[in-house]
Image (cartoon, coloured by chain):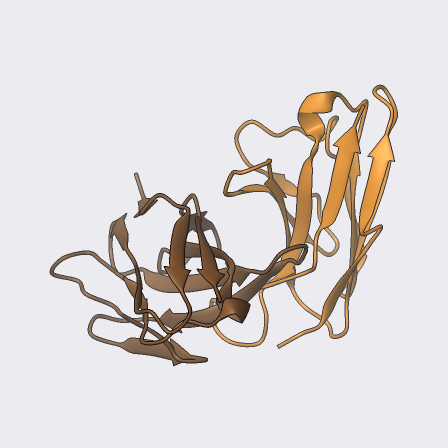
Amino acid sequence: GNSVTQMEGPVTLSEEAFLTINCTYTATGYPSLFWYVQYPGEGLQLLLKATKADDKGSNKGFEATYRKETTSFHLEKGSVQVSDSAVYFCALLTSGTYKYIFGTGTRLKVLA
Amino acid sequence: SAVISQKPSRDICQRGTSLTIQCQVDSQVTMMFWYRQQPGQSLTLIATANQGSEATYESGFVIDKFPISRPNLTFSTLTVSNMSPEDSSIYLCSDSGTEQETQYFGPGTRLLVL
């Protein structure tokens, strides 16, 4: 079945450090891939998405590239800020369905 | 993207009681979804709520425990019935949005059952 695997957290970084959160997936067909962010005490917000192979999603300095050959959608940011501290969820949506498959989430803590 | 609100934002309830969570969208949407996020866990889809028809429940979730209403295209409710401490979770609603395939989420309802 379809699944999403994220690197386990928590991830603790100093401000301005480079961030990578790994996400790999298993799916039939050609899914769309998403990163959602959940700030403390809030709901989920869409961070970025990619709908086909080699697409790059980007937002707020974050980027992720849909890599079909490695079935990955790793999240990166060149210089993190304290305000980026949150839980990040990778998710996939199989073509023609509305059912998201979420990863377990990765908690990021950025220290000043 | 639609703006989604939920009420209540949090509640503390006694076991055996029921709580109804409201979800309001600021525009008409075809599909609304209810998710559960147990402490430290990811999101699990409970059911899909379509206006004018019964909700469609995912495996492991039943209507008697989680009755859902969808009276119009902007509103839905989820009731958590006969609660136990295991029901302590964040409950989130979402819609299908205006962009293809992207779902937008409400802020969540944080439920603690004692």
Tell me where residue A79 appears, x and y as whole percent.
36, 75
Q: How many marks?
A: 0
Tell me where residue B2 appears, x and y as whole percent.
67, 74
Is residue A47 positioned above or below B21 on the image? below
Using residue A53 as the reference point, say whether residue A79 is left or right of it: right
For the point 70% across and 43% down, the residue is: B54
Q: Quadrant of residue A94?
A: bottom left
Tell me where residue A26 appears, x and y as whole percent.
25, 47
For the point 19% across and 56% down, the residue is: A71
For the point 73% across and 22% down, the residue is: B85
Chain B appears what colour? Answer: orange
Using residue A104 as the reference point, say whether residue A20 is left or right of it: left
Whether residue B67 is visible here, answered yes or no, is no
Chain A appears what colour? Answer: brown
Q: Which quadrant is home to the C terminus of chain B?
A: top right
Is residue A30 positioned above or below B2 on the image? above
Relative depth, front residue between A22 and A109: A109
